[in-house]
Amino acid sequence: MYYSFSILTFLVSGVICYNNVDYNVRGTTANGWEFVHDLFIENFEQERDLGASMAIYHQGKLVVNLWGGWFDESRTKPYDDDTLQLVFSTSKGVVAVAVALCVQRGLLDYSALVTKYWPEYGQNGKENTTVADILSHRAGLPLVSSAVEEYLNWLDWTAMIHTLEQERPLWQPGTAHGYHSMTYGWLAGELVRRVDPKQRSFGQFIQDEIMNPIEIEFYIGLPEKHEHRVSPVHYNERSKQNQSESMMVLLNAYNGYKMHQAEIPAANGITNAWSVARLYASLIGDIDDTKQKRLLDEATLKQAIKSYTPENEMDLIGHSTTSFGMGFLLYDRTFSSLEPDKFGHNGKILC
């Protein structure tokens, strides 16, 4: 049994409490789902959010689609249904979908060596890395050796790919897992680019093969015409205090158009809650009363969400017992109350 549920909320700093404030909450809730509307409003009342959107698909139908709050700290513009938002590591989910589509079409095989598709990758101890190793954060390349201050390299896909080809893994690929917070996107994305018959950029592949077929917005590389719709990210005081000056420079860069325009698939996806919910709904079944056919067939999805992480194996980077399928986080080991086959990918500002 698969589960489709998506909530996007964004904590911000500088929120001021007012009595009888109109929180600009708009949208729809189906009969029986009105309680979600009340919980959503509580986020603003309790100062958890400045602006946010939230959506839920249930059994292929949209039952909750809400937005509210303010676009930015000036509180002069509402956060509405046209607003887009950075979703950070939630972006990894759409990367996993792109790879799964290639597997479904016979272009990629999870069990194959990466060098079958990307020969230049096979050097400096990475020769036996499999596609599954990359998708499940077992590739041994959670970091690159360049300093945080050199983040502008992230804006250059070719430069990052060349860097990853030259890197030596921190552990033997396939023997352990550690969260590849940034590198996952370029590693998996390059595999898609290598096998794409149309030789598109990764962002264009996402647009043509995922966004357009199910009519959502999920940009990896934002077109300039949409920049004005992106609600800026604000960091709370605790986040600021816990970061070095150079790291804050990097975090603030996420609000810049250069960062939005670049293709950084692990972390700079720009979308809204409705699009994320609709994406996951389309993975587990037909939607809109079967008018829209599912993106992944049953067999491909089963492969994509099968755990590739040994039980109780510790994440070497996050120091926790996370579990990964082929790019998707699997939640039943993290939340014991959930049944098996619950999958997705959360996103947070500091990963």
Image (cartoon, grey):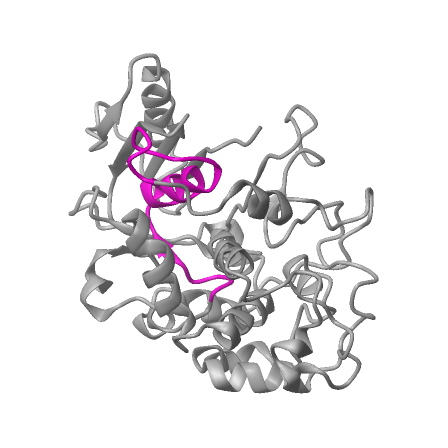
Q: Residue 134's spot in the image, x, y percent? A: 66, 65
Quadrant in the picture for residue 160: bottom right
**Rendered-image quadrant of the C terminus:** bottom right
The one nearer the camera, 348 or 216, is: 216
Residue 171, percent from left and from top: 81, 70
Q: Residue at x 31, y 52 (%)?
A: 213
Furthest residue to the left?
76
Q: Residue at x 20, y 33 (%)?
A: 24
110 or 204, which lies in front?
110
Quadrant housing the N terminus:
top right
Magenta includes 290? yes
Can residue 146 be seen by looking at this rendering?
Answer: no
Image position of 104 (left or right of 324): left
Rendered position, 181 above or below 296: below
| Vertical arrangement, residue 222 with respect to residue 128, above or below | above
Q: Which residues are magenta?
A: 265-292
Asked whether residue 250 appears in the rendered view, the answer is yes
Q: Nearer the viewer, residue 312 or 205?
A: 205
- Does the magenta segment cover residue 233? no
